[in-house]
């Protein structure tokens, strides 16, 4: 089988077309290409610039009240189960903030195969997180209540209708719908897979997501650098152009967490019906007091970490039809003596290529690139892991990070 390594550049969407198969046909390889594209070509005139969308933009502002669900998102759990996540209540930002109590709102999902008829229901877990900067002039943040519910017993290639919320508070979402993917099989694949990285919340982000949506993907790989909240202009409420000048006593840079809430609203129309599989990038590090990092990333997203045996949201794997996907963490230990490497070796060893002939890997920073700012930036990760990936014949690699 032909081997490719592909890096997805800044705000680039790549649709994997080689997975469209007829059961009786052999699996096409890159040697059979090039293939005629069947996606909608991007209109370059739609590039609107990289200016940040304001927080009061219609696609970013909060449009629900009280404890009604918002920022609803899907993620694959197993071939027969799905994660549904959402947020209720108001986040707070300022010098003094008080966290909401997650126990005051239930995490419930009702679902079924007919619109308006929900024959199954599940409950899940909820949490809040804080982003704290105990330095003069900087703002602290506490999130709304984040809910994660795993629904089970799903049939393949089937539409499911669902609502989420808390029935006791009469705070329940509108109905949403998604379609499950094929079971692992060498002759069944997601009809279209979207890959996007380094998205942000700019005018270009809008046209990127609109273009992605118009191509109707069955699953989305989000290869890191989601919101760029750590680079948003507002710092300490002052919009300081020189952070170190304005806040000389602050040892770390503040990150503006409401951008995460805006991003969740911005993405909801798509990811409430199409599962999005995320992996961390450098803009998700977001250091805060006491050396805490990645708090928003780890709190807001559900991934099949336990299901794939990694027990870490930084790296995990999943199946989608005849493809096995491995999401690797570049910002956690990747050394050959570490836990991630041991998990990766075990995960690769378990793959049955007669069931999932394609093996796809993704992580945020590419090992090979000619961009001066990131050239050989993750050479150490390459030296630790590349030989193992070659040994098991990885077919495709997706990355972001470079423009």
Image: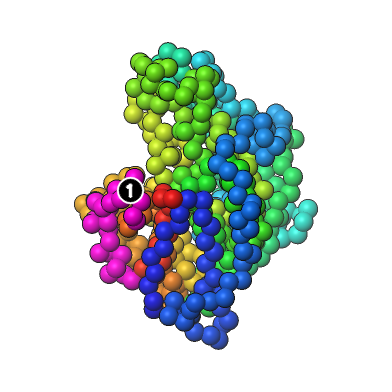
Position of residue 397 in the picture relative to residue 173 (left or right): left
Residue 350 visible in the picture:
no
Residue extending farthest to the front is 45
Residue ID for mark 1 = 372
Position of residue 356 in the picture relative to residue 157 (left or right):
left
Q: Residue furthest left?
A: 337
Q: Is residue 60 magenta?
A: no
Depth check, front residue: 108 or 208: 208
Q: Residues within 10 Å of mark 1 (few under 14, many from 20)?
A: few
Residue 202 visible at all: yes
**As drawn, 318 above or below 21:** above
Residue name at image x 23 percent, y 57 percent: 383
As drawn, the residue found furthest toward the bottom would be: 24
Identify the image quadrant of residue 5.
Answer: bottom left
Stretch of the chain drawn in magenta: 369-393
Percent position of residue 357, x then y? 43, 74
x and y, in percent, of residue 155 in the image: 62, 65
373 within the magenta span: yes
Task: Please tell me which residue lies in front, 99 or 200.
Answer: 200
Q: Which image quarter is the N terminus in?
A: bottom left
Residue projecting furthest to the top: 136
Name the one closer to the observer, 60 or 36: 36
User: Which residue is found at the position 55% from the left and 60% from the top?
Assistant: 194
Vertical placement of residue 265 versus 253, above or below: below
- Colour theme: rainbow
The structure residue drawn at horizontal position 61% and vertical position 71%, both measured from the top left corner, is 38
Q: Residue at x 34, y 22 (%)?
A: 251
Q: What element does badge 1 sit on?
A: loop
Horizontal and vertical percent position of residue 130: 48, 27
């Amino acid at each position: 089988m032909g081997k490719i390594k592909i890096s997805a550049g800044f705000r680039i969407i790549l649709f994997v077309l080689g997975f469209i198969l007829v059961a009786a046909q052999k699996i096409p390889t890159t040697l059979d290409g090039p293939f005629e594209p069947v996606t909608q070509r991007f209109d370059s005139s739609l590039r609107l610039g990289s200016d940040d969308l304001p927080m009061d933009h219609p696609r970013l502002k909060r449009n629900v009240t009280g404890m009604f669900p918002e920022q609803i998102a899907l993620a694959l759990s197993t071939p027969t189960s799905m994660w549904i996540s959402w947020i209720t209540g108001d986040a707070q930002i300022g010098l003094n903030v008080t966290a909401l109590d997650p126990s005051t709102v239930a995490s419930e999902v009702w679902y079924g195969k007919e619109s308006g008829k929900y024959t199954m229901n599940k409950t899940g877990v909820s949490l809040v997180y804080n982003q704290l900067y105990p330095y003069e002039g900087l703002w602290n943040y506490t999130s709304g209540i984040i809910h994660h519910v795993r629904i089970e017993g799903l049939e393949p290639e089937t539409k499911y209708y669902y609502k989420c919320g808390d029935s006791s508070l009469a705070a329940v979402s509108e109905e949403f719908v998604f379609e499950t993917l094929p079971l692992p099989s060498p002759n069944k694949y997601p009809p279209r897979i979207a890959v996007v990285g380094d998205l942000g919340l700019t005018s270009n982000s809008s046209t990127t997501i609109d273009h992605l949506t118009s191509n109707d993907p069955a699953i989305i790989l989000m290869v890191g650098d989601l919101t760029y909240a750590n680079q948003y202009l507002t710092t300490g409420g002052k919009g300081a152009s020189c952070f170190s000048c304005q806040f000389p006593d602050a040892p770390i840079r503040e990150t503006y967490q409401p951008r995460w809430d805006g991003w969740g609203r911005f993405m909801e129309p798509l990811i409430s019906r199409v599962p999005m599989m995320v992996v961390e990038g450098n803009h998700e590090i977001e250091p805060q007091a006491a050396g805490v990092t990645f708090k928003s990333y780890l709190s807001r997203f559900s991934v099949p970490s336990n299901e794939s045996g990694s027990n870490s949201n930084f790296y995990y794997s999943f199946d989608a039809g005849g493809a096995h996907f491995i999401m690797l963490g570049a910002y956690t230990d990747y050394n050959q003596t570490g836990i991630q490497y041991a998990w990766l070796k075990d995960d690769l060893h378990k793959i049955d290529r007669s069931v999932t002939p394609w093996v796809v890997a993704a992580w945020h920073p590419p090992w090979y690139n000619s961009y001066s700012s990131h050239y050989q930036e993750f050479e150490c990760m390459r030296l630790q892991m590349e030989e193992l990936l070659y040994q098991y014949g990885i077919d495709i690699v997706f990355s972001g990070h470079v423009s």
